């Protein structure tokens, strides 16, 4: 068993790794390194409750300061890992000397992509951290014209929050149908209709050519020549795994930290979890990187198990799951869907704001999506994990 475990990334995955180490009997020392000034906090409320003002910032931390005492962990916030030595088990830090480890958990997550010139203009925001959310919230003054670039889940959650504040919102999306690559065209159009019903205007099948303004953003020039007036621009165009500090370390990196089915990396005694980890999922026979809350916690536990018990542990083979709250609809999804999968609406309809639908391939259940039907999603996720048939759920 590793004597000193260092967890790099004071994220959900990082905290869950610390908790799993203690729960699974690790009695050695633990150090948790985080580059933000804040201790680990919950990110989903940032684009919902925090942005709308329903939650104060003090509500999002997972634990108050004294809550770390039972874990007996050295929490170092505002400290960044700058490199991992290739031939020694040491991590260099932005403050203080390097820190040695017997076991290392990489949980550095991902950072938001941006657009050229965005950093030169005030009024342009990304939403990844608590500080991002508070900065954006301060800009959402009455009458502010909001343009959301990227109609993925984060972008659409921001659009929902802004509409709840009564602000005009235009969503720009490169794909013809938002979320079609994740949920298929039919569900993508349903979600697009949900937002249109709440007053969001869409520009789809078009990119952004330029952000315009003198010192502060004033407009968004689209690739088709249209110009959208804007006081606030929110970029939701995806993320990049935070792996720059691993260059030259011997840890294989390709769209994240490359892991096997047990969360092990290419270096002994080094595992990875959460948004940063690109792992082989034997359940679906694919390599994937899952950027969702549930996976961060589940994978952190699996990574710790691998670190403490060795290579004979059970493979990590999850059924990915996520949820998104938009207006009065809780959208939930489980599974892994590919283009061409069958789609079947089992119950309800988008107009009713309640539905249950499933996806399948060659007769097998591959995914499920629900609106405001949490118990159904739980049952369907279990069925996917058990290799359920489309015919079974159709008859249920």
Image (cartoon, grey):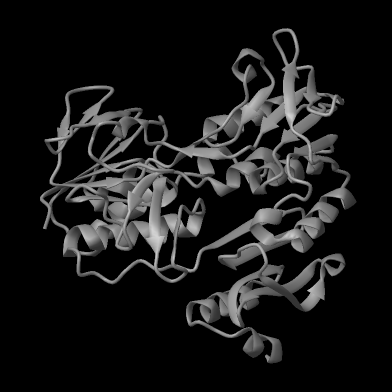
Residue drawn at x 25%, y 52% is 71
Taking the image as shown, residue 296 lies to the left or right of residue 164, namely: left
Q: Residue furthest top?
A: 214
Please say whether residue 25 is visible from this viewpoint.
no
Q: Quadrant of the C terminus?
A: bottom right
Q: Quadrant of residue 137?
A: top right
Residue drawn at x 66%, y 54% is 181
* Residue 166 location (% of width, % of height): 84, 38
Of residue 258 and residue 82, the one placed in the foreground of this image is 258
Q: Quadrant of residue 368?
A: bottom right
* Residue 20 location (% of width, % of height): 29, 59
Q: Quadrant of the N terminus?
A: bottom left
Residue drawn at x 75%, y 57% is 188
Please say whether residue 93 is visible from this viewpoint.
yes
> In this rendering, is residue 212 above or below 84?
above
> In this rendering, is residue 105 above or below 329?
above
* Residue 298 location (% of width, % of height): 40, 62
Residue drawn at x 57%, y 48% is 44
Of residue 53 and residue 20, the one placed in the foreground of this image is 20
Q: Quadrant of residue 22?
A: bottom left
* Residue 243 location (% of width, % of height): 37, 36
Taking the image as shown, residue 345 lies to the left or right of residue 10, namely: right
Report the number of numbered marks. Answer: 0
Taking the image as shown, residue 311 lies to the left or right of residue 59, namely: left
């Amino acid at each position: 068993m590793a004597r000193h475990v260092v967890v790099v990334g004071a994220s959900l995955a990082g905290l869950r790794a610390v908790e799993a180490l203690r729960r699974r009997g690790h009695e050695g020392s633990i150090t948790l390194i985080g580059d933000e000034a804040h201790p680990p906090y919950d990110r989903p409320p940032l684009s919902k409750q925090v942005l709308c003002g329903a939650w104060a910032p003090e509500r999002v931390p997972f634990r108050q300061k004294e809550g770390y005492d039972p874990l007996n962990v050295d929490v170092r916030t505002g400290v960044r890992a700058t490199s991992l030595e290739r031939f020694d088990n040491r991590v260099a830090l932005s403050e203080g000397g390097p820190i040695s480890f017997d076991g290392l958990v990489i949980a550095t997550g991902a950072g938001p992509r941006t657009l050229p010139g965005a950093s030169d203009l005030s009024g342009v925001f990304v939403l990844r951290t608590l500080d991002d959310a508070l900065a954006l919230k301060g800009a959402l003054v009455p009458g502010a014209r909001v343009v959301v670039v990227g109609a993925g889940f984060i972008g659409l959650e921001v659009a929902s929050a802004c509409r709840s504040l009564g602000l005009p919102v235009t969503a720009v999306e490169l794909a013809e149908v938002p979320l079609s690559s994740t949920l298929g065209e039919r569900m993508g159009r349903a979600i697009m209709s949900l937002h249109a019903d709440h007053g969001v205007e869409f520009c789809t099948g078009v990119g952004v050519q330029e952000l315009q303004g003198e010192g502060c953003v004033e407009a968004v020039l689209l690739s088709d020549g249209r110009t959208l007036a804007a006081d606030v621009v929110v970029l939701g165009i995806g993320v990049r795994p935070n792996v720059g500090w691993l260059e030259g370390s011997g840890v294989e990196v390709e769209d994240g930290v490359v892991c096997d089915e047990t969360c092990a990396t290419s270096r002994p005694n080094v595992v990875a979890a959460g948004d940063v980890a690109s792992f082989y999922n034997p359940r679906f026979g694919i390599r994937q990187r899952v950027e969702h809350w549930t996976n961060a916690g589940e994978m952190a536990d699996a990574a710790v198990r691998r670190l403490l018990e060795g290579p004979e542990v059970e493979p990590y083979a999850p059924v990915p799951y996520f949820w998104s709250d938009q207006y009065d609809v809780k959208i939930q999804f489980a599974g892994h869907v590919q283009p061409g999968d069958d789609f079947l609406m089992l119950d309800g309809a988008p107009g009713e704001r309640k539905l249950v639908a499933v996806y399948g391939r060659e007769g097998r259940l591959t995914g499920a999506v629900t609106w405001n039907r949490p118990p159904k999603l739980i049952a369907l996720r279990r069925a996917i994990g058990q290799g359920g048939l489309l015919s079974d759920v159709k008859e249920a």
